[in-house]
Image: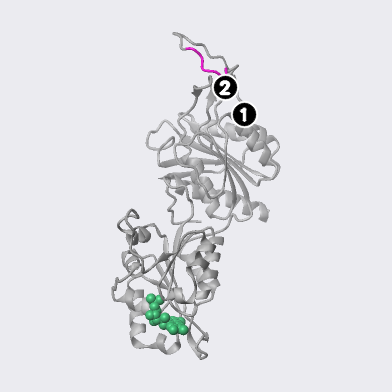
Amino acid sequence: MTTDIMSDMKETTTRHRVTLCVTGGVAAYKAADIARRLLDMRLDVKVMMTANAERFVTPLTFEALTGTPVIRASQWPEPGEGPMPHIDIARESKLILVAPATANIISKFANGVADDMMTTTLLASTGNVLMAPAMNTNMYLQPQIQSNIARLKKDGVSFIGPISGELACGVEGVGKLASVEEILHAVKERLNLSYDLAGKKIIVTAGGGREPIDAVRFIGNRSSGKMGIAIARQAFLRGADVTLIAAHCDVPLPEDFTVVRAMTAEETLKEVRERFGDCDILIMAQAVGDYRVMRAPDCKVRTEERMTLELESNPDILAQMGKIKEARILVGFAAQTHNLIPYGREKLKRKNLDMIVINDVSRSDIGFGSESNEVTVLKADGEEITFAKERKDVVAVKLLDLIKSEIDRRIDA
Ligand SMILES: Cc1cc2nc3c(=O)[nH]c(=O)nc-3n(C[C@H](O)[C@H](O)[C@H](O)COP(=O)(O)O)c2cc1C
């Protein structure tokens, strides 16, 4: 699967933002169902309503459904709200869905009218508008409306419907709002969404482990957590039931799915073990500390000229899970500076993994902390796939594609 990526590492939300613009037609009541179904599709839904739409349905309905205030097309920014809400809304929206779209909003948009928040937001958009018109047949077939629709289509605006059927005004003809299913399908296509991991329980570990030296000091590593978080986010967007087990991460943790903190290898082992029996896939992207300090005191030790730390090995979480994995898919990561492939192959086999993702951490442009990664994935069947240098969320999508192929292969086998 390829997807148009917009996961932003600075954000805590993973969901794509859809602004649902509701205008003043009878079909406005169906927008409530559309809003609810968009939420089910794991989208971040914000609703904007024209003053006339509010005569058909109350903003309260949408506020109750989405949990966020409705943006009123008639409102002006209050002091402190930020000077350009229409620009922000347009920029932050992956898609602006106008449903139902009245003859009025279509004509305003086609002619560049910007007399309220909705029309100005539409003008500030950049090729991400989908309109679902609904109106009386005569209104729809009126040459002005037809030429306005043709003009918008030529300018890159997408349309879904209208369809033919019995209209609210009692006549039979074209002008009916496309079905909710058709509208959702169009949204899915526009956003390139796929829910191919729906029903799969996936555990992802991320970040850099920290092993205490004393109450305030620790042994850590440079892992930022970006790669593991990107995988968890993309798996969530594809419908998976995701649990992220996070050690120290340099970026905010997502809020859309379960996140468990585990700083030490022991803590991570405990959290993984607790959930492993009930999961389908474990992806260990966390840089777990290989060693821990023996007898680390729980107070701060006095600073002296020299200090000797005695270390002992941490449990090998992957190897332990490899022994009991049965049909689960187990994916490990190897951060290496040299001998990448031979070491990866050996680790894959020794730990009974299905895949291992090899990172060359000697390069400063990829790996720890950077926004991009270039990895080689070794599979248990001997296949070796290298992903060219890409943003970490793109690498995450490609890795999940490989995992999905493995799931499908096992179903077919
Ligand atoms: C009862 C009633 C039903 C209406 N239904 C529609 C409709 O389905 N489609 C449409 O384009 N206009 C319809 N209109 C006309 C719009 O409400 C009117 O053009 C209004 O100015 C649209 O405002 P808005 O686009 O800012 O929401 C209807 C008007 C009334 C009074």
The residue wearing badge 2 is 292
Give the image location of residue 399, x and y in percent.
Answer: 52, 47
Give the image location of residue 239, x and y in percent.
Answer: 57, 55
Nearest the viewer among 411 and 15 is 15
Residues packed near mark 2 inside 10 Å, few (<14), some (14 to 19) or many (20 plus): many
- Tell me which corner region of the image, top left, top right, bottom left or bottom right, holds residue 154: bottom left
Nearest the viewer among 283 and 63 is 63
The residue wearing badge 1 is 266
| Precedes in sequence: disc 2 or disc 1 | 1
Q: Which residues are magenta?
A: 297-302
Give the image location of residue 94, x and y in percent.
Answer: 42, 60
- Tell me which corner region of the image, top left, top right, bottom left or bottom right, holds residue 158: bottom left
Q: Is residue 334 shown to the viewer in this render?
A: yes
Measured in 3D between alpha carbons, the distance from the residue under mark 2 to the one under mark 1, in whole angstroms, is 10 Å
Main SS category, magenta section = loop
Residue at 60 percent of width and 33 percent of height: 268
Q: Circle 2 sits in a helix, a strand or a loop, which is it? A: strand
Residue at 37 percent of width and 79 percent of height: 104
Residue lying farthest to the front in this orientation = 79
- The colour scheme applied to this rendered structure is one colour
